[in-house]
Amino acid sequence: MGRYLIQRVLSIIPTLLAMTLITFAVMHAIPGSPFDPSTRGGNDLPPEVIARIEASYGLDRPLPLQYLSFIGGALRGDFGYSFASRSRTVAELLGETFPISLHLGLMAFALALALGIPLGILAAARQGGMVDHLVRLLTMLGIAMPSFVISVLLILLFALVLRVLPAASVHWEDPRAWLLPTASLALGPLAIFARYTRAAMLDELSSDYVRTARAKGLRESSILYGHVLKAALMPVITVAGPIFASIATGSFLVETIFSVPGMGRFFVSSIFAKDYPVIMALVLIYGMFLAFSNLVVDALYTVADPRAQGAIFSAKGGA
């Protein structure tokens, strides 16, 4: 187990390097300087002044040296100063925005799990009935509708028509400001969890061991929750890791629509301002979050089904 985890952690390093290298190359392939007057957030300065500012940030050096400088700083936890907020370091800005995105993501993830899995179980237990059709319709809508459409509909209903919740979440300390962005962010994952749970439950319910359990006279609730659910959770665990990584690091659209002062909205403004250090740091954090979420998924496999431990280790060469 220990050897396998070390191998997995080491395998994350080239993935992260590839992500940062591609992001770095794409950023510098875009014409224009972050300090050019035509760039959003840039200053209207003479070219010679812009050249001196670029030199002070090391942008006059060859690109390979700039990339190696970023990697060296990242290893020390130093991402430098933001181009757009020049008096502040990237670490300071991330320290303000990342907790908000993580808070929002955790609430949405918990809501999606708390409702999605029971809905999937309910639909499987009532296969072909009214409840099953209703759950399938809701999951289809949840998957098909983009989060920005859901956000707009929720704002129209609860902020403009009913006037019970604020449309914007600028004052994040107010718990009422959490509700609409959390619901917008949770609906898609909720639908995915419900659909995976329903499909996995139906597969398990048609298995021989379920027929044997029914023949022995076991109660249906004991079969569902004591035997079927545990096996059916495996596909849900598989998709839970990437979903958690994607919503816990900030949703660009949802945070922008609701004016949530989190990392997603921060990332959008950084792209417009060509704030290279911030963009690179955010991509690196997302990659690390995704990689370690997958590690947690593998660990949960062994908890949900100990038989999976040997399969995972042998398949990935870690036994």
Image: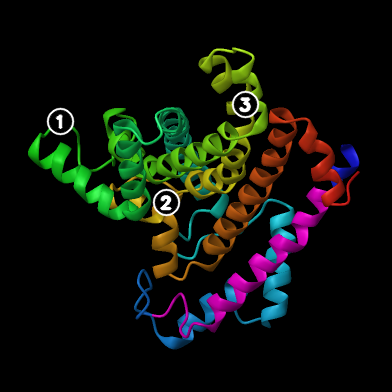
- CA separation in Å, label 3 and label 1: 48 Å
Counting other residues with Cα less than 10 Å from the Cα at mark 2, is it few (<14), some (14-19), or many (20 or more)? many
Instruction: Provide the secondary structure element on which disc 2 rests.
Output: loop
The residue at which mark 2 appears reads as 251
Toward which corner of the image does residue 70 lie, by quadrant?
bottom right
The residue at which mark 3 appears reads as 210
State which mark lies toward you, 3 or 2: 3
The quadrant of the rendering that contains the N terminus is top right
The residue at which mark 1 appears reads as 164
Give the extent of the magenta segment. 8-36
State which mark lies toward you, 3 or 1: 3
Q: Amino acid at mark 2?
A: Ser
Instruction: Provide the secondary structure element on which disc 3 rests.
Output: helix
N-terminal of the two: label 1 or label 2?
1
The front one of 209 and 118 is 209
Instruction: Provide the secondary structure element on which disc 1 rests.
Output: loop
Magenta span includes 43: no
| Residue drawn at the location 64% of the way across and 66% of the way down | 20
